Amino acid sequence: MNTQQNLPLAGVKIIDFTHVQAGPACTQMLAWFGADVIKIERPGSGDVTRTQLRDIPDVDALYFTMLNSNKRSLTLNTKTPEGKEVLTKLIKESDVMVENFGPGALDRMGFTWDYIQELNPRMILASVKGFSEGHHYEHLRAYENVAQCAGGAASTTGWWKGENAGPTISAAALGDSNTGMHLAIGILTAYIGRQKTGKGQKVACSMQDAVLNLCRVKMRDQLRLDKVGYLEEYPQYPHEPFTDVVPRGGNAGGGGQPGWILKCHGWESDPNAYIYFTVQDLVWTPICEAIGRPEWKTDPAYTTPKARQPHIMAIFGAIENFILSTGKDKYAAVEYFSGFEIPCAPVMSMKELLHDKSLRQSGSIVEVPHKTRGSYWTVGCPIKFSTLRPKVTASPLLGEHTDKVLAELGYSSEQIAAMHAANAV
Ligand code: CAO
């Protein structure tokens, strides 16, 4: 059992000046690993996600609770003289400050990087913005889908023809939480660097860059397309012409192994009765055996990936027919094909994931007691360690730790009362 004191980041103090998703996802993870994360929020309102998409009236929304666990909340109006003084003290005493305000907001508040360094040369200032410093879009404000479009994910996701053709957004938070995870790596790297140099530094990750980093193989495809004019693993090949840009590939594999989503028993009424099936060359012979097509093992039209590609969609059709004609639901299909070492998985709904025994057992889905909600389910730490198992604790109520944090900074109860009276906290 971990106690707060023996967690790896115990003793690291983080000013969490973040909101919505990209920044909070980063600081939540650092809090799980033991950092003292003090979330600064505007008095009276707090992080906008506290009230967004509420499922229970007057209590913090799941959007907030699921991104702000293990933190403390300090309300502070950093545009008042008192608020600026508190923030100044905090900067002097903290190791890291994380922010994801709109471009220039921290400077306008009076806390430029030069000034922060002056206050605390060991400070690591970590920022998320839509676009990187100096980028021609640096002034743009950004949300998730803005980043998915700007980072190349939307142009390469979805269907290239048919009534649903067009750039498509992923449900995964490639722009938000993904950028937060990149930033966490940057912060930890700067922290280790500081142990060697004694100096902090500014760490920044733009949402566009974080999305692009995940679209690396699509950039690979652009470079290949420029060279040879076609992409042989895409479903368009060899029947449809390629233009000079990477097309959307529907549910195609994207790597060296063709794959597709196949219907399973019950698909007519269950929107998720599907599996993802990969035609890995290594297991072509077992695939032929599994679907009762032994003749394909030696037929030259089937024996190599190159020979299969022109009719790969017909091959997927044959596999799907086999699944449906043998009445396999998605779990039975995966169970069956896994016996042949074929890479595949069921399409999981959020409901199935929420109730998944293995995910609950591993701490990937956890239930957290909360002061006003009763308890809430959330996604736990996705990183597993041999000796550390992060314990997820409730997100703080707005301003729950204001007085305690101020007292720790050395303010007397009279001074704290005066700050309340001035609406600075
Ligand atoms: N006390 C006083 N003022 C505060 C404060 C506090 N505790 N916290 C924030 N503010 C102020 C800021 O200083 C800023 O003031 P000015 O604009 O007058 O300088 C103001 O609140 C608004 O901040 P903002 O621009 O960050 O917030 P917004 O709601 O207008 O914009 C967003 C939201 C997300 C578009 C913008 O923050 C942004 O582009 N962030 C960077 C990219 C990012 O992280 N986006 C993803 C969010 S997750 O989907």
Image (tube, rainbow, N blue to C red):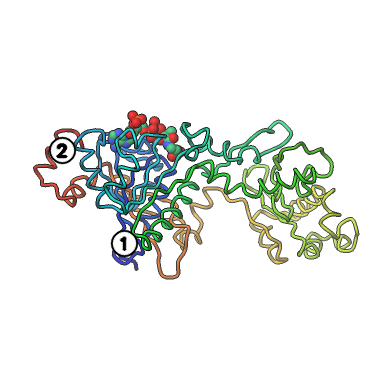
Q: Element type at marker 1? A: loop
Residue 40, quarter of picture = top left
Q: Nearer the viewer, residue 4 or 209?
A: 209
Residue under numbered circle 2: 419
In this view, the residue farthest toward the left is 414
Asked whether residue 45 appears in the rendered view, the answer is: no
Q: Position of residue 283 (x, y in %)?
A: 76, 64
Q: Residue at x 82, y 48 (%)?
A: 314
Amino acid tagged 1:
Ala
Residue 158, quarter of picture = top right
Amino acid tagged 2:
Met
Residue 417, quarter of picture = top left
Q: Nearer the viewer, residue 377 or 133?
A: 133
Check disc 2: other Cα within 10 Å, few if <14, some if 14-19, many if 20+.
some
- The residues bearing labels 1 and 2 have C-alpha atoms spaced at a distance of 29 Å
Q: Position of residue 298 (x, y in %)?
A: 89, 63
Q: Which mark is residue 10?
A: 1
Is residue 104 left or right of 304 when viewed as pictured?
Answer: left
Is residue 120 shown above or below 81? below
Asked whether residue 24 appears in the rendered view, the answer is: yes
Q: Name the quadrant of the C terminus.
A: top left
Q: Name the quadrant of the N terminus.
A: bottom left
